[in-house]
Each structure stands twice: as structure tokens, then as C-alpha cells.
Image (cartoon, rainbow, N blue to C red):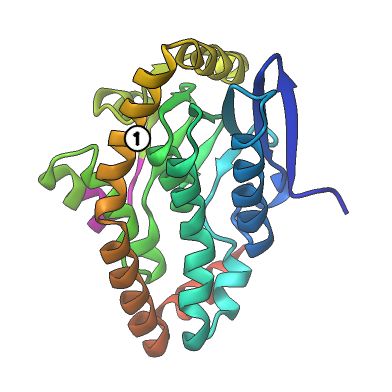
């Protein structure tokens, strides 16, 4: 079995690749744990100045949580399961080095949220991104929290309540994508940005990123608790299970 993550060195920039292309790099528990573990290791590696996150293949950065695992989750397991995924967001924020999301395809749900908490986002014109959980019967709570740090109330409501995915051009217009480049330049551009950030005066960089980290984490625990309660209620009613069953049967 191949590893669920791969790490490549581009000079002093580490490219951390999610390696489940057949599943659109969906976040299984195994992958979520591996991403968090790798982020901690790379942050502590003196040979690494910055980190680029990307997905294997050409279709997806990360399509969100693994639906088969999501279908099997029991109400009593939701807090641990959801916490495993949310720990990725926290580790990206806690990483002191630049973390750049290279969006090589769809970034939905958990993948979208990983991108939102990264320091910059690079995409190509075929990238689509958004927060579709509500259409799977899962309350859009953690995602709407991260979007609140980027977007106004009305646009956040629209995206959270419709679950629609944004084309890369609209996402760039809204400020959710920082750089729009050709598909074959996404990772290289992300590495260049990581290098540029890493070359900034060290105290100024760490203090600036640290301030954004403090702001982002200030509401994290409340959003997590609300997300747990919302998912517990939804799963107890059986709504996510029904939507996932219909999707898996159709596909």
C-alpha cells in the first residue's frame, strides 16, 4: 500500500502531497493523522524553510472527508472523528513556517478549509472550491467560521447555505485565491511564494503570522463545539447517512 502522504524537497521548501488520488485525496482518518504528523515534523526540521500543500493527480487538492468513513461514523464517535480532521487546520495555523496551498483541483469541505487556513492559496483556472457539507446533511459550521475570516456575512451565508462550489476566477475575485496560474505552474509558484515568505526578516514574519494565528484560533474551540453538536444531531436523525447512501448507490 502506498503512503497516504508524500514529501518532496524543492530546495528548502517541502511539498507535502496528499496521496489518495483515486479517492480525490479525500480525508480519511489515516490521511488526516498523517498530514498533522507531517506538518509537526516539517515545522521542526531545520532543513525546511516552508511547506507547500497539494494533492496527488490532476483532479483534486482534497475533496473533503472520506464519504465511506463518514457513513460509518456513529454518534458517539463524532467528536473524535471530527476532531481528527479539525486538528489539521490547527496544525497548519500552529506551523511557524510559511504554509502555501497549491490547489491542483477541487478543494471542497475539509480541503477548502485547509486552503483557507494556509498563508496563501495558488490555483489554476480549472480549480473549484467551496463548502458543500450542507448538501450532505452536515451543518456547515467550522467551514463558515473559517470563511468569516475572509468574507463578509452575506457571501458567507450564501456559500454556507447553498453549498455551491466557486470557480477559480470567482474565488480570486472574492480574495479566496491569491494567485491564479497555469495548471502546470501551481506547485512551482507555491514554492516560490514560500521561499519569498521564508526570506522575510524572521521576527517580523513570525510575529505577523502569529498574530493571524491568534485571531484565527480565538473562535476555533467555539466553532468546533458547535460543529460537534450539529453533527451529532444530524447523525442522530440519519440525514447525512441517507444522503451518502444515495450518492454511493448512484456512483
Q: Residue at 44% of width from left, 18% of height from top?
A: 202
Q: Which residues are magenta?
A: 158-165
Q: Is residue 184 magenta?
A: no
Relative to 10, say whether 222 is above or below: below
Q: Residue furthest right?
A: 1
Q: Residue 40: x, y in percent?
A: 60, 44
Q: Helix, strand or loop at disc 1?
A: helix
Nearer to us in this view, 251 or 56:
56
Q: Residue at 62% of width from left, 48% of height from top?
A: 35
Relative to 220, say whether 175 is above or below: above
Nearer to us in this view, 190 or 198:
198
Q: Residue at 65% of width from left, 24% of height from top?
A: 48
Q: Quadrant of residue 201?
A: top left
Q: Badge 1: few (under 14), some or many (20 or more) residues near its Cα, within 10 Å?
A: some
Nearer to us in this view, 55 or 227:
227
Left or right of 58 on screen, residue 152: left
Amino acid at each position: 500500500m502506498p503512503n497516504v502522504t508524500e514529501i518532496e524537497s524543492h530546495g528548502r521548501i517541502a511539498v507535502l502531497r496528499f496521496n489518495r488520488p483515486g479517492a480525490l485525496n479525500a480525508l480519511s482518518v489515516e490521511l488526516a493523522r498523517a498530514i498533522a504528523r507531517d506538518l509537526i515534523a516539517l515545522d521542526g526540521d531545520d532543513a525546511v524553510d516552508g511547506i507547500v500543500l497539494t494533492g496527488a493527480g490532476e483532479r483534486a487538492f482534497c475533496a473533503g472527508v472520506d464519504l465511506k468513513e463518514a457513513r460509518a461514523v456513529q454518534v458517539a464517535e463524532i467528536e473524535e472523528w471530527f476532531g481528527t480532521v479539525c486538528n489539521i487546520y490547527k496544525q497548519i495555523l500552529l506551523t511557524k513556517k510559511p504554509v502555501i496551498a497549491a490547489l491542483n483541483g477541487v478543494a471542497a469541505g475539509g480541503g477548502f478549509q485547509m486552503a483557507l487556513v494556509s498563508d496563501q492559496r495558488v490555483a489554476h483556472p480549472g480549480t473549484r472550491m467551496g463548502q458543500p457539507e450542507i448538501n450532505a446533511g452536515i451543518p456547515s459550521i467550522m467551514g463558515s467560521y473559517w470563511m468569516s475570516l475572509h468574507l463578509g456575512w452575506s457571501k458567507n451565508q450564501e456559500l454556507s447555505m447553498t453549498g455551491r462550489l466557486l470557480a477559480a476566477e470567482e474565488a480570486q475575485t472574492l480574495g479566496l485565491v491569491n494567485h491564479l496560474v497555469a495548471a502546470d505552474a501551481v506547485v512551482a509558484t507555491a514554492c516560490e511564494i514560500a521561499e519569498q515568505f521564508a526570506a522575510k526578516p524572521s521576527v517580523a514574519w513570525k510575529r505577523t503570522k502569529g498574530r493571524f494565528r491568534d485571531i484565527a484560533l480565538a473562535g476555533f474551540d467555539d466553532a468546533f463545539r458547535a460543529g460537534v453538536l450539529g453533527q451529532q444531531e444530524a447523525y442522530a436523525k440519519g440525514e447525512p447517512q441517507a444522503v451518502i447512501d444515495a450518492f454511493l448507490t448512484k456512483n
